[in-house]
Amino acid sequence: MTEHFEFQSIGRVHSPYKEKFAIPRQPGLVSAAKGHIELLGDCNREEILRGIEGFSHVWLSFVFHQAIKEDWKPMVRPPRLGGNKKVGVFASRSPFRPNPIGLSVVKLEGVKQRSHNGQANQWQLHFSGGDLLDGTPILDIKPYIPYADALPEACGGFAETAPDQSTHVEFSPELAATLQAAELKHAGFAELIQQVLSQQPEPAYHKASERDYGVQLYDYNVRWRRIDSHLMVFEISPI
């Protein structure tokens, strides 16, 4: 007998990632990515967060809201395997699942209360190292418990080791003024770009080419191309 459940989101993510392309494939890989969760409805209250600042990291349960309309399949091609080998969807972290629910651990940066319409009534949970699209609905927040959640003897299957992040990222000298202005709006913006692009977000079968790529981070379009063994950022334009 099929069971159906209905959940309400308890918060909404605000992050630098405005599109799915170039989002890190796992949390924690881009520490420069800062974001926050805006608590909603009955969960927008101080007491629901009381005690959470005693933890360094939290688990976020969320919905892959931009994958809901796309059909899921029992087998997928993980990027970690070059996009050529299939595994079962339950052996992957693909967003295209029978139920599009994700789970990420992020570093807790603090709890803040913001003013809205002259009243300090908006509670926010700030984090770093997230891999969540801007606007992602949050279903639940739980503390990360080191003795139970960190299992050094665990086997990682085809993702046993962290991905290679040695790709060198350079900025065109002509971008110096634009990058400086962007840093005033978003502290650490250059580091964010470097960390995101070092994940080599372009499809594996494109890596030998010199085609141009682009991604929106915060309110800027960032464009780059691969030149030999490094990536060159040649355009940063405000939206």
Image: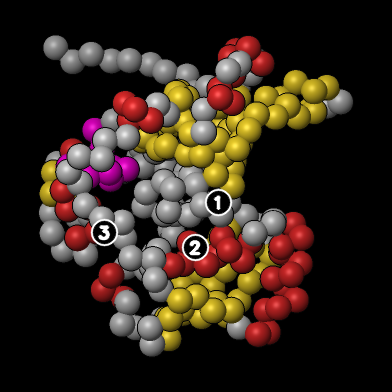
Q: Is residue 211 above or below residue 29?
A: below
Measuring from the top left, give residue 6's x and y in whole percent: 38, 16
28 and 63: which is toward the camera: 28
Q: Give the mark, 2 or 3, whose residue is nearer the N terminus.
A: 3
Span shown in magenta: 91-98
Q: Three-letter amino acid code at disc 1?
A: Ala
The outermost residue toward the bottom is 228
Tell me, for residue 33, which label it has, or none.
1
Q: Quadrant of residue 46?
A: top right
Quick check: is 172 in the magenta stretch? no
SS of the residue under disc 3:
helix
User: Contact (CB < 8 A) between labels 2 and 3?
Assistant: no
Other residues around mark 2 within 10 Å, as few (<14) / some (14–19) / many (≥20) = many
Residue located at (17% from left, 43% from top): 155
The outermost residue toward the right is 118
Q: Three-letter amino acid code at disc 3?
A: Pro
Check the picture and name the quadrant holding the N terminus: top left
Q: Is residue 133 visible?
A: no
Q: Is residue 157 visible?
A: yes
Tell me, for residue 79, which label it has, or none.
3
Measuring from the top left, give residue 109's x and y in whole percent: 60, 37
Q: Quadrant of residue 98?
A: top left
